Image (cartoon, rainbow, N blue to C red):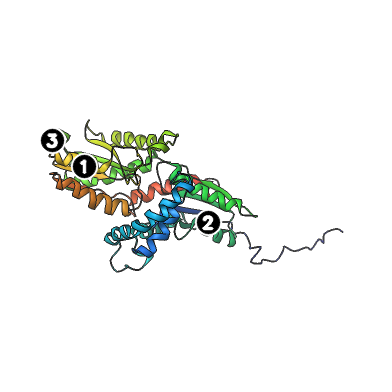
Amino acid sequence: MKPSAHAVEDPVTPAHPRPDRRPALILANLGTPEAPTAKRVRPFLREFLTDRRVVETHPALWRPVLEGVVLTIRPARSARKYATIWRAGHETSHSGSPLMHHTERQGELLASALGDAVQVRIAMRYGKPALRGVMGELMEAGCRRIAILPAYPQYSASSQGTVIDEAARFILASRDQPELRTIRSFPGAPAYIEALATAIESHWERHGRPDPAAGGRLLLSFHSIPRAMHDAGDPYRSECERTAALLAARLAAPEGLIRTTFQSVFGPARWIGPATIDTVAELGAAGCPSVDVICPGFMADCLETLEEIDQLNRRAFTSAGGGDFHYIPWGNDAPGCVAALAEQARAALSGWVD
């Protein structure tokens, strides 16, 4: 039977939405508990620490330790730390999380920078809004072109890798699959390096530049990864070193001023180093007059920057005899950070928008 010359399109139904021609950009970050309480921290930690990209120990060995020890002790400890950084007036709200607050703001600013031709959403790998849930909402609305921008400048299987894994799981479970793009990493991207340099130079204009001859230092503190991951071929350390080299060149830093360190070690395994907290303690004990610390791998302030660096590492430095300690924020809604994200977003969307 020949089709009618006057055949009409299938009706638009919830199962067959009219395609939205605008591509979507998802800004993805790690995630955060919904509140600074043990009750809310525990499920977040469980989801995070059961990810085989994060803890590569076989589940048969790891799960008893996780359930019997880690999730018994750590939620209350972590909750107390989160409580020290939760935004005032939002103590019981998800938006009280600095990471959530800053990521939401970055999403708004990215939407403004990219224009109405792109729909911008945020997602978290762990917790809410869940990445697969956001992808599903976009598909239900008719979107068929999705670009994912993980907010991690340096690649690691435990950061970008697990975001891409999660997107792939959505694809595997989908009958109607979207066209998908991801940004792998951007450790040497011009706008990213410039954002870091601008924040540092602005800080130096206000507080003075550390004098390496007198013992002053600028630390570039990156999140660490287990040594076993590095030895297995994870390129993370080399990408951190690339960022450090390009930033040092951009700042015309004299020899001895900049040191690259690693933070946020967890558990008894060996991690790549030197450890930031050991470094600041050693500098303090040596009578270092001033240390500046910037965290190039964190595009939004969070527990690791606001509590670990600006509180714990500050105390380690000053109690050991050090002088002035400065944490240099550079991300969040700073124009340079947003420009760095927009640079990557435009690359991911190339050919999809004019």
Three-letter code, disc 2: Arg
Three-letter code, disc 1: Val
| C-alpha span from label 3 to label 1 | 15 Å
Q: In the image, residue 139 lies at what x, y percent?
A: 58, 58
Which residue position is annotated with label 1?
280
Q: Is residue 143 visible?
A: yes
Q: In the image, residue 132 lies at what x, y percent?
A: 53, 56
Three-letter code, disc 3: Ala
Q: In the image, residue 101 lies at what x, y percent?
A: 36, 60
Which residue position is annotated with label 2?
132
Which residue position is annotated with label 3?
214
- Mark 3 vs mark 1: give the one in front: 1
Labels 3 & 2 near each other (Cβ < 8 A): no
User: Looking at the image, which residue is at 19% across and 45% down?
Assistant: 205
Q: Is 183 left or right of 222, judged from the image as shown?
A: right
Q: Secondary structure at mark 1?
A: helix
